[in-house]
Image: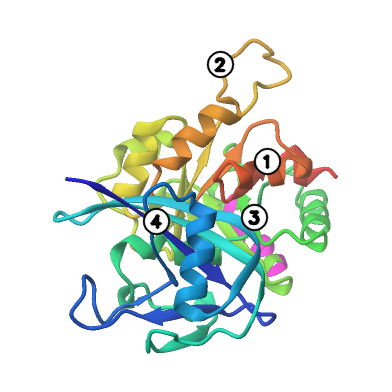
């Protein structure tokens, strides 16, 4: 079975809405909505194909892009790789040049069931920020901890993982309530790093799973709208995608300063793993804000960090 290489554009306006188009009836996945794009022609580079497809389909001239996500998908009767780029600048006004209906929608308002299965992780990638904070020191000192969290939120962090493994359940629950209140006031989301059974009923917007918890899961924890996991290799990334999780943290990108010779991924291995991941992936391990562009250019959703966001 031949592999079909498809490119698509996530075109956003100044209000943060994204352009979607309805597929014509009578074609594969007909009647569903999609992100504009199409098949690469023989010998065509992805960005060349994207520029051609968007001019042919919606009448715009692409001026600048950034990678968003790359998604291999098997429909059974066909296999494809969908390469998606954010279109950050373009000329012209989008119109349905092939008669297809167009619509501008905010990513939070998109219904994944109205899209082909291959497109659904794109919606998640559009909803997730590029910077992901994992909380650091002093969870046993709530006042100090929450002050540092407030500072990170003031610097624009929109996704926070509450990591405090050593706290007793009652103390963790109290800290989660206070942390979520802070996050909500700043428009951020709080993820709980806890066993699903112990996280039941706690105050949070989602759940983050360790790689050990991921290995023992038989299905996605259904009580949580946003669920991710820590991964270290292709097998764990595949398991996270098979379970329908929303994102993964892939580490270690770099060795710990205390273990300079320890095994680590490096950017080339990170990019190779992300290319087949089927869900948004954050780079983790010795990273800071200066590494964000590198992570995105290598196919990642962005970066996750403790020190890089907690202490600056």
Where is residue 140? Give x, y as percent: 71, 43
Magenta extent: 172-182
Disc 2 crowd rating (10 Å Cα; few below 14, some 14-19, many 20+) is few
Q: Is residue 136 visible?
A: no
Q: Which label lies toward us, 1 or 4?
A: 4
Q: Residue 295 vs residue 120: left or right? A: right
Q: Residue 224 vs residue 27: left or right? A: right
Q: Earlier in the sequence, mark 1 or mark 3?
A: 3
Q: 200 or 235: which is nearer to us?
A: 235
Cα separation between marks 2 and 1: 20 Å
Q: Quadrant of residue 290?
A: top right
Q: Which residue is mark 4?
A: 40
Q: Earlier in the sequence, mark 2 or mark 3?
A: 3
Q: Earlier in the sequence, mark 1 or mark 4?
A: 4
* Label annotation for residue 117: none
Cα separation between marks 1 and 3: 12 Å
* Label annotation for residue 294: 1
Q: Which residue is mark 2?
A: 263
Instruction: Give SS at disc 2.
Output: loop
Cα separation between marks 2 and 3: 25 Å
Instruction: Give SS at disc 4.
Output: loop
Q: Earlier in the sequence, mark 2 or mark 1?
A: 2
Q: Which label lies toward us, 1 or 3?
A: 1
Residue 248 forms part of the magenta stretch: no
* Label annotation for residue 130: 3
- Who's the residue at 51% across and 87% down the image? 95
């Amino acid at each position: 079975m031949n592999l079909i290489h498809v490119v698509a554009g996530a075109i956003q306006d100044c209000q943060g809405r994204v352009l979607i188009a309805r597929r014509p009836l009578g074609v594969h996945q007909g009647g569903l909505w999609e992100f504009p794009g199409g098949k690469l022609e023989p010998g065509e580079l992805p960005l060349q194909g994207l520029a051609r497809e968007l001019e042919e389909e919606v009448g715009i001239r692409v001026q600048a892009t950034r990678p968003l996500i790359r998604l291999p998908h098997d429909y059974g009767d066909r296999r494809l790789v969908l390469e998606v780029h954010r279109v950050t600048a373009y000329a012209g006004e989008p119109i349905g040049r092939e008669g297809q209906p167009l619509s501008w929608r905010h990513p939070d308002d998109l219904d994944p069931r109205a899209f082909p299965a291959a497109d659904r992780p794109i919606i998640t990638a559009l909803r997730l920020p590029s910077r992901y904070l994992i909380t650091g020191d002093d969870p046993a000192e709530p006042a100090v901890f929450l002050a540092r969290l407030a500072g990170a939120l003031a610097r624009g962090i929109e996704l926070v993982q509450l990591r405090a493994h050593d706290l007793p359940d009652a103390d963790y629950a109290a800290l989660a309530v206070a942390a979520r209140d802070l996050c909500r006031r700043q428009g951020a989301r709080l993820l709980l790093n806890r066993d699903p059974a112990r996280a039941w009923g706690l105050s949070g917007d989602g759940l983050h799973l360790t790689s050990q918890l991921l290995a023992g899961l038989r299905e996605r924890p259904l009580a949580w709208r946003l669920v991710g996991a820590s991964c270290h290799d292709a097998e764990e990334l595949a398991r996270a995608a098979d379970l329908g999780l929303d994102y993964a943290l892939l580490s270690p990108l770099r060795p710990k300063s205390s273990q300079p010779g320890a095994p680590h991924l490096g950017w080339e291995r990170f990019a190779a793993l992300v290319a087949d991941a089927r869900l948004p992936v954050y780079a983790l391990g010795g990273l800071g804000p200066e590494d964000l562009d590198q992570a995105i250019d290598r196919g990642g959703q962005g970066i996750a960090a403790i020190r890089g966001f907690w202490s600056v």
